Amino acid sequence: MNVSVEYLGDKKFKANTIKSSFTLDCKEITPVEYFATGIIGCTGIDLVMMAEKDGFEVTNYSVKAEIERTESVPMKFASMHIIYTFDGAFDATKAKRYIGASLESYCTTVNSIRDSVKVSYTIIQNGEKIADKEELVSMSVPLEDGFGGACCS
């Protein structure tokens, strides 16, 4: 992967990837906010892709994060609680499996921070809380979930 950023002036930057480019406007959204949304975007995309792979549609979907940062510079993330809210005609076991596979195996961004950030999650499916403040399991346990990397490499 190769990415680059060019300064455009007025606290705006052009971010370039192999596939596309976009503008980072630091007066509107800070780099830390971009980073945080990238983390939850990655795991959110995994959920939708895994469900679609099984023939299910995810609707009314949102994912948000409650993040605590350290008080001293560089003010690293100390903890991140991810809250998934969605509807889908699949059971709670599948929903937990999709999210668990993303968080534990496939989502590069979450797995890049999990050694230094306490990550937990809540799942609300079809208006019912099916997991509440669950913490990630140890990365020393190999997980085989059968998805084979549903998304985003």
Image (spheres, helix red, strand yellow):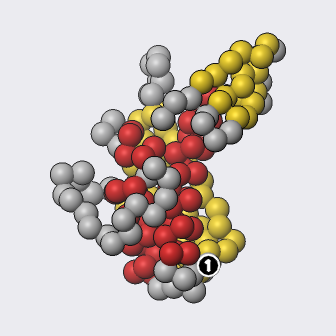
Residue 127 seen in the figure:
no
Residue drawn where x is 52% and y is 45% of the image: 39
* Residue 81 in the image, given as x and y percentages of width and height: 47, 51
**Nearer to us in this view, 74 or 139:** 139
Residue drawn where x is 75% and y is 30% of the image: 23
Mark 1 element type: loop
**Which image quadrant for residue 44?**
bottom right
**Nearer to us in this view, 96 or 49:** 49
| Residue occupying the far front of the picture | 18
* Residue 146 in the image, given as x and y percentages of width and height: 33, 72
Q: Residues within 10 Å of mark 1 (few under 14, many from 20)?
A: some
* Residue 132 in the image, given as x and y percentages of width and height: 44, 66
**Nearer to us in this view, 137 or 140:** 140
Identify residue for label 1: 57
* Residue 125 in the image, given as x and y percentages of width and height: 55, 76
Residue drawn where x is 23% and y is 53% of the image: 138
Residue drawn where x is 79% and y is 13% of the image: 9
**Which image quadrant for residue 149?**
bottom left
| Residue occupying the far right of the picture | 10
Name above or below for residue 13 compared with residue 109: above
